[in-house]
Amino acid sequence: MRKIRWGIIGPGNIAIKFAQVIKNMDGVELEAVASRIKERAQVFGKSFDVPENKCYGSYEEILQDESIDAVYVAVPHTFHKDISIMCLKSGKATLCEKPVTISEEEIKEIVKTAEENKIFFMEAMKTRFLPVNQKVKQLINEGIIGDVRLLQADFGFKAPFDPCNRLFDKKLGGGALLDVGIYNVSYSSFIFGNHPVTIKSDLYFGKTGVDESASINLSYEDGKIAQLYAAINVNTIREANIVGTEGRICVPRFSNAESATIFINGEEKNIHMPFGINGFEYQIQEVVNCLNEGKLQSDIMSWKDSIEIMRIIDVAKNQ
């Protein structure tokens, strides 16, 4: 397997976690970083031993670097579409942070570009790749809790109100639905599939016009129901409960899970699968595997998945 050399666009907090993994994984190397402010790229690069001449002050520069195989896009999500398309047109395999875009139409544009240029693209929904969540999906498919009827998932945190913060800035795609609600919707799709029969939502819009909380009910065939809640104005338990006819699985901190508990006939069984590094390594390994196998997309987080999940988000947002 060839070593995949990575570049990072957007040296923010999420990129720090990504870089920590790259520096501690086999088969990958952090080659370069880019920011619109060169000094930010240099500070970030110094922390992760990136040579100063590989700390770029523009996105165009990093995409001209022929030594880079793949780019991690970690900018605010209103810029995901344009930058991902730039990366793909430059021949760079692209891993774009969630939410992949702010609408279904935008992700369709990205996928079209990936298809036309025959370049790998994937949404960085790390939750799907975590060992515990993969194990939970396997157990559900094996019927360990019978026929699954209900999924309840919440992800809320109380952010200090600041109209200048991207979370509360409508122009930067702020709001609960896109920032954390995407985890809930994607998890529901992971368990039940991408095609709910009905979508009902109730969003609370705050002073700046962004949704500070979002409640979504998805109904699927055969009476399956997903009850989802996301917020940036209140702390929630942040767990997923999957209820079947023969038992239940609880996944604490499902978006970043290392454990789960199975409840069947009054008995509990705990599953503990700690991260090797910080949890980002599993989606990165998926990209590495796909590139070495010549794939353009992941089977676990496919283009179709990203498009259809954003379709659900669009409907929930516009209701």
Image (cartoon, rainbow, N blue to C red):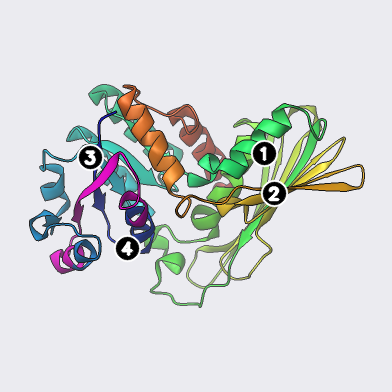
* Between discs 3 and 2, the one toward the N terminus: 3
Label 1 close to label 2 by CB (< 8 Å): yes
Query: CA separation, marks 1 and 4?
Result: 31 Å
Quadrant in which residue 107 is drawn: top left
186 left or right of 38?
right
Residue 245: x %, y % from top left = 87, 35
Identify the mark nearer the N-term, 1 or 4: 4
Q: Which residue in the structure is indicated by mark 1?
A: 136
Marks 3 and 1, how far apart in space?
Answer: 34 Å
Q: Earlier in the sequence, mark 1 or mark 2?
A: 1
Query: Is residue 102 shown left or right of residue 34?
Result: right
Residue that badge 3 annotates: 87
Image height of 311 relative to 154, above or below: above
* Alpha carbons under labels 3 and 2: distance apart: 37 Å
The residue where tag 2 is placed is 260
| Residue placed most toward the observer, 196 or 49 | 49
Q: Which residues are magenta?
A: 20-42
Question: Label 1: how many residues lie within 10 Å, few (<14), some (14-19) or many (20+)?
Answer: many
CB under 8 Å between callouts 2 and 4?
Answer: no
Give the residue drawn at x 68%, y 51%. 153
Specify the amino acid type for callout 4: Gly
Q: Position of residue 252 (x, y in %)?
A: 67, 55
Furthest residue in direction left, as rendered: 53
Image coordinates of residue 4 in percent, x first then y, are 26, 37
Frontmost residue, 56 versus 257: 257
Residue on which disc 4 sits: 12
Does the stretch in magenta take in 194?
no
Q: State which quadrant residue 154 falls in.
A: bottom right
Residue type at mark 2: give it.
Answer: Ala
Q: Position of residue 282 (x, y in %)?
A: 45, 42
Q: CA distance from mark 2 to mark 4?
A: 30 Å
